[in-house]
């Protein structure tokens, strides 16, 4: 909890709280830091702070306080203090998109691209949760400008396009993102995105196969077979080799599946008009 000076006390006020504690109070210090810098014991300092707060000589710091400090620091050419003030402002109001975006911009200007990307990513996530997909897409785009290889931002950007039902952008990003998530062994996120893709593109059997492979890697063999079967249901009539490959994968997962044994493949092809 950060505190700030409140209403100035009367000049003739002899309260020992003022003489001992008030000089240690600054908007850029939290209560723990005030306790550390005060010559009194922790108990005496906290008791004194209680008295000062009750008399309105001390108050909780606000985002406006931190912004004012940042503005003054910037005017003085003190970018480090300005940056610290905006970090504190974000801590004070973590859901304030404008404040967090300003922090991201300041971090980017300071060459701290990784931290800037994280802040843009958080903004995008918050906006996406509020279903402001266009603004979220811009924020994720800013994160990727700061750090092009930021996989979290790329995955969440894809999620936005899926939820926005932008099929062109979804198809552009889907395979690269799934492959990157696979390389990073982030199979849980890959599965979640794969499930969304299968719902959005039920006729794109390749997505069902990718999802089935992901489920297999996660050792969810039952789900893997379900998605391989869905792929078979939507695969094109000319994709004989793909059908055979899918049957082979099912058998690798469950060799007891007599319904898809290789000796019965010709019959299976005939059922699908592929013999």
Image (cartoon, helix red, strand yellow):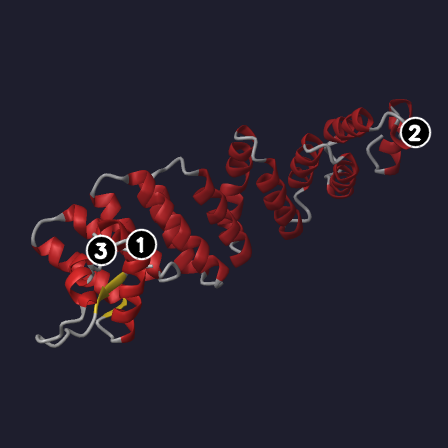
Give how far apart the Cα atoms at labels 2 and 3 are: 71 Å
Residue 137, compared with residue 8, is above or below; it is above
Mark 2 vs mark 3: in front: 3
First along the sequence among labels 3 and 1: 3
| Residue situated in front as seen by the camera: 259 or 224 | 224
| Residue situated in front as seen by the camera: 157 or 47 | 47
Give how far apart the Cα atoms at labels 3 and 1 are: 19 Å
Determine the residue positioned at 22% across, 55% down: 28
Disc 2 crowd, CA 10 A, few/some/many (<14, 14-19, 20+)? few
Q: Which residue is mark 3?
A: 28
Give how far apart the Cα atoms at labels 1 and 2 are: 75 Å
Write down the quadrant of residue 211 in the picture: top right
Which part of the image, by quadrant, shows the C terminus? Answer: top right
Which part of the image, by quadrant, shows the N terminus? Answer: bottom left
Q: Which residue is mark 1?
A: 42
| Residue situated in front as seen by the camera: 44 or 169 | 44
Residue 257, compared with residue 227, is above or below; it is above
Per the image, label 1 sits on a secondary structure element best described as helix
Determine the residue positioned at 59% across, 39% down: 190
Mark 3 vs mark 1: in front: 1
Mark 1 vs mark 2: in front: 1
| Residue situated in front as seen by the camera: 90 or 102 | 90
Write down the quadrant of residue 263 in the picture: top right
Disc 3 crowd, CA 10 A, few/some/many (<14, 14-19, 20+)? some
Determine the residue positioned at 60% across, 36% down: 187
Q: Which residue is mark 2?
A: 258
Residue 169, compared with residue 264, is above or below; it is below
In the image: residue 120, left or right of residue 70:
right
């Amino acid at each position: 909890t950060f505190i700030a000076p409140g209403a100035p006390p009367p000049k003739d006020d002899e309260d020992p709280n003022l003489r001992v504690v008030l000089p240690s109070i600054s908007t850029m210090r939290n209560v723990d830091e005030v306790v550390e810098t005060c010559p009194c014991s922790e108990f005496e300092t906290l008791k004194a702070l209680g008295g000062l707060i009750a008399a309105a000589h001390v108050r909780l710091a606000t985002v406006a306080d931190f912004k004012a400090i940042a503005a003054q620091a910037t005017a003085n050419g003190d970018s480090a203090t300005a940056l610290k003030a905006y970090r504190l402002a974000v801590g004070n109001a973590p859901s304030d998109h404008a404040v967090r975006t300003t922090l991201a911009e300041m971090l980017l200007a300071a060459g701290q691209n990784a931290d800037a990307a994280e802040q843009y990513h958080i903004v995008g996530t918050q906006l996406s949760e509020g279903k402001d997909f266009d603004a979220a897409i811009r924020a994720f785009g800013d994160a990727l400008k700061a750090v092009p290889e930021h996989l979290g931002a790329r995955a969440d950007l894809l999620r936005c396009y899926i939820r926005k039902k932008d099929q062109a952008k979804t198809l552009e990003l889907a395979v690269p993102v799934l492959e990157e998530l696979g390389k990073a062994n982030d199979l849980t996120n890959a599965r979640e995105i794969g499930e969304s893709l299968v719902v959005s593109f039920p006729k794109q059997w390749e997505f069902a196969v990718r999802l089935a492979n992901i489920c297999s890697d996660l050792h969810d063999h039952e789900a893997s077979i379900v998605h391989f079967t869905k792929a078979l249901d939507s695969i094109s009539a000319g994709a004989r080799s793909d059908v055979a490959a899918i049957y082979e994968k099912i058998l690798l997962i469950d060799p007891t599946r007599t319904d898809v044994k290789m000796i019965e493949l010709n019959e299976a092809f005939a059922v699908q008009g592929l013999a």
